């Protein structure tokens, strides 16, 4: 499970030393380790759709493990695979997969019903039926969105004809920008979804279209790029190359030539001192999504980190969203930059749990969370501009003293770094979220826009 991206991949033990993997990313370390631990050879890998939110590892598995790829024939992938059509079955050597055309999330989307003889066990639903919802249908184009949403409705209606006890194994879950409600459950059953999924309780196709489309928020630009990348398939060495250790002069030269400086350190470390113009993106499970949202894929990356942070984690997370242009890291980190006598920038911090901090903070507040988070409860009179919009709309934020906030502080610091880059000054980042603010001040949050 990828907590940061909100996705799940699956490994099925076929009972004879072979395994089936489903919807794996290019970071194959976990599935390889799981297969090794169980003594399985990765004989098959199935793809439910051309993924928009992560780079697929299917082709890499095929070319490093002699794994057979099962995917929709309608996906027009340009590498070797077994193209499956609706109702086509594939014998896994005892267990069987039956392809079910379930378009909506994407045009070529397939779900896979896994059966033991005539007994259905579970269905890999990808971005069709997910726990408590259905995945978004607006990734193709504005012109195709309504048609795909209607197809999504029919796909869900088809899936719920399966027996109630059949397990539901979706790819997308809570935290995915492919749209999923909050919650910890990653799998379900057909019966549970029939009883509890709000979209299955909606009466009629038109009402379903209105409900699903009304729930959709924004998504990163890289979602437009990755499906075509996945159609061609990605190959990597066993791991991305170790980034070069760069001295301060090399870093300055790269930045002058247009490289992006990404500071991986925690919020407090960035606030205490950072290289002017650096993008704050703390290394955490959500790192890849925000890197892909805020940095163009062709821009070389230079990392700054603390010594105890795992550089390989940053490299693999970048690879998951198809960002491979990593120039290196600042050798010695901020200590080396300071020792060279170069300028240091700082950002103020305010603690949402500290009444004294709130009492002295500037009155203007910018909330950079997603729309649904903001409308669910925000500080009264807070402005709202999503973090993902600030790369192009920083000028929509007025100058002057400003407190920037999100749910915890990481996105707010990313926003502050973008605003500082665009010339904003007197910025303070709120550590904590609206709930902390409400508890500290004793005031209620506003709802809605």
Image (cartoon, helix red, strand yellow):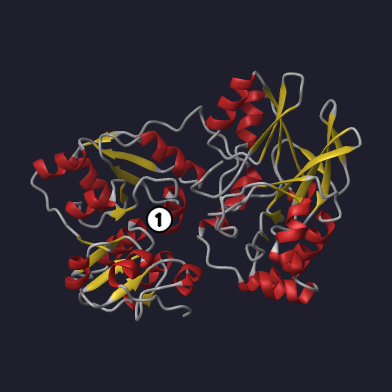
Residue 263 percent across, percent down from the top left: 29, 48
Residue 203 percent across, percent down from the top left: 79, 73
What kind of element bears circle 1? loop
* Residue found at x 62% / y 74%: 214
Residue at the limit of the structure toward the front, as seen here: 442
Residue 70 in which image quadrant: top right
Q: Nearer the viewer, residue 420 or 197?
A: 197
Residue 63 percent across, percent down from the top left: 64, 28
As drawn, 416 above or below 174: below
Residue 317 in which image quadrant: top left
Name the residue that disc number 1 marks.
295
Q: Quadrant of the N terminus?
A: top right
Is 303 left or right of 227, judged from the image as shown?
Answer: left
Residue 90 in which image quadrant: top right
As drawn, 280 above or below 217: above
Residue 168 percent across, percent down from the top left: 73, 47
Query: Dot 1: few (<14), some (14–19), or many (≥20) neighbours within 10 Å?
Result: some
Q: Nearer the viewer, residue 212 or 226?
A: 212
* Residue found at x 64% / y 36%: 58
Q: Nearer the viewer, residue 57 or 63?
A: 57
* Residue found at x 21% / y 55%: 271
């Amino acid at each position: 499970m990828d907590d940061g991206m909100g996705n799940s991949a699956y490994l099925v033990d076929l009972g004879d030393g072979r395994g089936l993997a489903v919807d794996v990313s290019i970071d194959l370390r976990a599935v390889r380790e799981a297969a090794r631990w169980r003594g399985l050879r990765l004989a098959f890998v199935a793809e439910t759709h051309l993924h928009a939110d992560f780079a697929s590892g299917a082709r890499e598995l095929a070319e490093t493990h002699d794994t057979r790829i099962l995917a929709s024939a309608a996906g027009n992938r340009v590498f070797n695979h077994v193209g499956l059509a609706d109702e086509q079955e594939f014998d896994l050597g005892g267990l069987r997969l039956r392809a079910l055309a379930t378009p909506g999330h994407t045009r070529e989307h397939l779900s896979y019903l896994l059966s033991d003889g005539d007994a259905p066990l579970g269905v890999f639903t990808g971005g069709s039926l997910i726990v408590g919802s259905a995945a978004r249908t607006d990734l193709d184009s504005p012109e195709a969105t309504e048609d795909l949403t209607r197809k999504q409705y029919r796909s869900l209606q088809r899936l719920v004809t399966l027996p109630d006890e059949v397990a539901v194994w979706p790819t997308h879950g809570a935290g995915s920008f492919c749209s999923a409600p909050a919650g910890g459950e990653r799998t379900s059953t057909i019966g549970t979804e029939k009883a509890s999924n709000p979209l299955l309780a909606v009466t009629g196709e038109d009402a379903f279209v209105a409900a699903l489309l009304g729930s959709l928020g924004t998504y990163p630009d890289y979602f437009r790029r990755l499906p075509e990348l996945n159609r061609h398939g990605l190959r990597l060495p066993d791991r991305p190359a170790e980034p070069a250790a760069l001295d301060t002069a090399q870093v300055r030269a790269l930045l002058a030539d247009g490289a992006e400086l990404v500071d991986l350190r925690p919020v407090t470390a960035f606030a205490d001192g950072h290289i002017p113009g650096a993008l704050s993106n703390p290394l955490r499970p959500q790192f890849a999504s925000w890197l892909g949202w805020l940095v163009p894929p062709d821009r070389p990356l230079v990392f700054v980190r603390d010594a105890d942070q795992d550089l390989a984690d940053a490299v693999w997370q970048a690879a998951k969203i198809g960002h491979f242009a990593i120039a290196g890291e600042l050798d010695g980190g901020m200590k080396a930059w300071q020792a060279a006598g170069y300028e240091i920038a700082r950002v103020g911090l305010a603690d949402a749990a500290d009444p004294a901090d709130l009492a002295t903070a500037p009155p203007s507040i910018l909330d950079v969370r997603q729309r649904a988070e903001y409308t669910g409860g925000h500080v009264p009179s807070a402005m709202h501009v999503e973090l993902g919009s600030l790369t192009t709309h920083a000028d929509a934020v007025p100058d002057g003293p400003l407190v920037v906030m999100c749910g915890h502080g990481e996105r707010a610091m990313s926003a502050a770094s973008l605003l500082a880059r665009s010339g904003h000054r007197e910025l303070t980042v709120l550590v904590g979220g609206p709930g902390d603010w409400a508890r500290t001040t004793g005031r209620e949050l506003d709802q809605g826009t």
